[in-house]
Amino acid sequence: MDDDAALNAALAAHLLPEPPEKLGVAVSGGGDSMALLALAAGFAQTHGVRLYVISVDHGLRSGVREELALVTDFCATQGVPHQIESWSGWDGSGNLQGAARAARYKLINRWAETVGLRMVLLGHTADDQAETLMMRLARGAGVDGLSAMAPRRMREGITYVRPLLDVTRAELRDYLTRRDIAWADDPSNDDTSFARVAMRQALTQLEPLGLSARTLAGVARNMRQSREALNWQTHSAAREVAQVQAGAVRVDVPQFRALPEEISRRLLVQAVMWINGGNYPPRRSGVAGVQAAVRDGRTTTLDGCQISFAGEVMWIYRELNAVRDISSKPGGVWDNRWHVEGPENNPRLHVGPLGEDGLALCPDWREHGLPRGAMLSLPAIWNGSELVATPVFDGTTGWSAEIAGGQETFFAALLSRQ
């Protein structure tokens, strides 16, 4: 197999045997993404896929529009639509690269929804994978962190695919050179004030010792396989020790304490993320503190969730303070996870937490089998300060509140955790 065929096969392995009808590609004009665009254009022509391309101008340096003109010109030769989105949201504080990345995904997601895409390709390479692994190694990451970037990841309903994680940057530039395709080099890639750039330069010193980008990408792949095994074991353990009730997680304490520490940690982390709707896990130090509290049977909090105990049962549920000020209209989603529906279309109604005032109006709340704290944070229907309904339990008023995707999503998330 020649070099071009190997690259085409690398892409096809992520898209076949059932290619999407529409496919998006995020392209910056750099060598990695231009090579991905060229490969995707060939794939689209061969398999009858409609291709769409997006670029994001972060507004952080001059010359970007000239670089993106390379993308526009190439797309024109392929008859592919090219959309340029702009971002101007950085206020000069915090992590610039992190803010730019978050904004980029938000813009791409919005564009994908507009175009009707369910899948977008990203041009990360083995070099990016190696740099990510080394950066996380420097922070003392565990198996999840050292798994680095996943080949696939879902963000708000859009599947992002990285088909070139086993391909080096040099191989992609050789491909572009052979095909006489121009690309732009981002000058910020030489700015060692960025941690990734500093790590990239350090890796050039490690390659003679055998720590090449391809080798380190292989380590990340091995860690990813280990993570998948741990996810499977955590899922199996959760089926034995945990139950889901009204959006809370109920855990058998003796069985939980008997689990290997890493498995119990993962179960705890996933419970918190499922309940608070977070995209990122809580800090390991915070989780360690909660694990110590579990050993002692002490009530504690973590990332907007409360962990409490009743006999030999541990409850994990949303903390009232985390949702106290969250309000939405019926018919929508409350706290990013509760779908609340009802019979009335009254503009004065809103969804908010049951809270202390609402619970005082529910004298039989103990019959539902939930801790008091869990009841306080459940969604309720309010008309001003008047309690209209408690839709999680009250089936007589026509109101309902269901977890988005169903309560089974807790267990499913244990297997799909990235």
Image: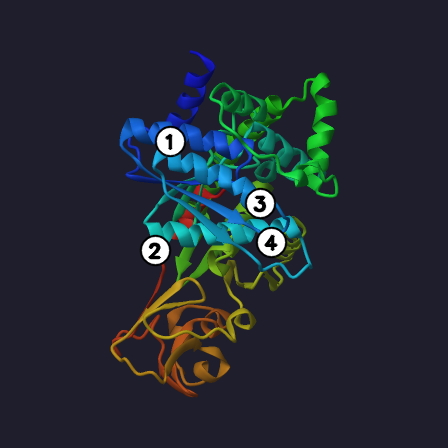
Q: Earlier in the sequence, mark 2 or mark 1?
A: 1
- In the image, which is nearer the foreground, mark 2 or mark 1? 1
Q: Residue at x 47, y 55 (%)?
A: 274
Q: Quadrant of the N terminus?
A: top left
Please state if 148 lies on the left or on the right of 337 as rendered: right
Q: Residue at x 35, y 54 (%)?
A: 114
- Residue picked out by circle 1: 41
- In the image, which is nearer the foreground, mark 2 or mark 3? 3
- Residue picked out by circle 2: 405
Q: Position of residue 345 (x, y in %)?
A: 28, 80
Marks 3 and 4, how far apart at CA: 18 Å
Element at badge 3? helix
Marks 2 and 4, how far apart at CA: 29 Å
Marks 3 and 1, how far apart at CA: 23 Å
- Residue picked out by circle 4: 99
Q: Position of residue 108 (x, y in %)?
A: 45, 49
Amino acid residing under circle 4: Ala
Amino acid residing under circle 2: Gly
Amino acid residing under circle 1: Ala
Give the number of the disc on residue 64: 3
Marks 2 and 1, how far apart at CA: 35 Å
Q: Residue at x 62, y 36 (%)?
A: 132
For the question of whether residue 343 can be seen, the reply is yes
Q: Are marks 1 and 4 in contact (CB under 8 Å)?
A: no
Say few, some or many: other residues with alpha carbon within 10 Å of mark 4 (under 14 / 14 to 19 / 20 or more). some
Q: Earlier in the sequence, mark 1 or mark 4?
A: 1
